[in-house]
Amino acid sequence: MDQTQDFWSGRNAQPIEPPEELKWPGSLTRIPDWIYTDPRIYELEQQRIFQGRTWNYVALECQLPKPGDYIRSHVGAIPVVVARDAAGEIHVVENRCAHRGAEFCKTYSGNAKEFICPYHQWTYDLSGRLVGVPFRRGLRKEGGMPASFRMEEFSLRRLHVTRRGGVVFASFRSDVEPLEDYLGPEILTDFDATFDGREFRLFGQYRNTLPGNWKL
């Protein structure tokens, strides 16, 4: 299975088309309520914005100072894990086991050599590659995975990653344009004024949860 292909809410899901009855009113001075509340619009936004040809902020490099450091994040509604491997490379993978879809990483941040799903103990390295399956060859010559089972076909869902000025971005799409072109010259100037290559230090974190979707 090509883990770099484009996905929506499933590995083989079809793109969602906007419902005919949801049409923008004639006036451009008011935003209709259903833009904020209709679940179909929300799913379209997840597909076309967060899983479209976009770069999404997921972490700061200073949150991952050492090999093995990881932090949970999100791309839209999809939970992801951002991890730095032993070589210093940063990877972003969906926080769902390729076996039964359980979230394998439960803590917000930490340091690990590998990720082990608590459901059936499938084990992944920090790049998302499947490296261990319990009882893969069965027990006492009974059970186990079929002969056709290939570990490389069950890696975690990987995202494309780019970094600039200590900021980590990820995208589900392989055909997304370079970050510099995506931001454009005006935004890039403002971005580089803050993230100008200086090494950042993390003094603390503040998190809260609001009862609303991303537009609020």
Image (tube, rainbow, N blue to C red):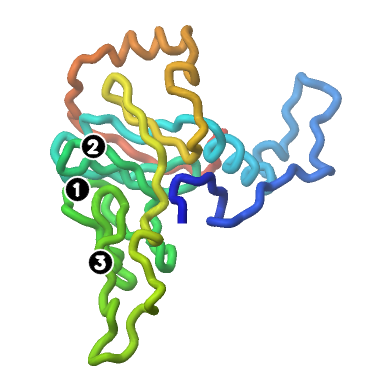
Name the residue located 37 percent from the left edge and 34 percent from the top edge. Answer: 161
The earlier-in-sequence mark between 2 and 3 is 2
Q: Position of residue 136 (x, y in %)?
A: 29, 77
Tell me what residue is drawn at x 20 percent, y 22 percent: 200
For badge 2, the amino acid type reads Glu
Is residue 138 placed above or below 162 in the rendered structure? below
Q: Position of residue 177 (x, y in %)?
A: 49, 25
Q: Which residue is mark 2?
A: 89
Task: Judge depth for marks 2 and 1 and give the one in front.
Answer: 2
**Residue 132, labelled with which disc?**
3
How many neighbours does mark 3 have within 10 angstroms: few (below 14), some (14-19), or many (20 or more)?
Answer: some
In front: mark 1 or mark 3? Answer: 3
- 153 relative to 142 in the view: left or right: right
Residue at mark 1: 110
Identity of the residue drawn at 32% across and 73% down: 120
Amino acid on which the number 1 mark rests in the picture: Gly
Q: CA distance from mark 2 to mark 1?
A: 16 Å
Calculate the distance from the C-alpha at mark 1 to the C-alpha at mark 3: 21 Å
In the image, residue 73 lies at what x, y percent?
36, 42
Relative to 88, residue 122 above or below? below
Judged from the image, the secondary structure of the residue bearing numbered disc 2 is loop
Q: Earlier in the sequence, mark 1 or mark 3?
A: 1
Total numbered labels placed on residues in the image = 3
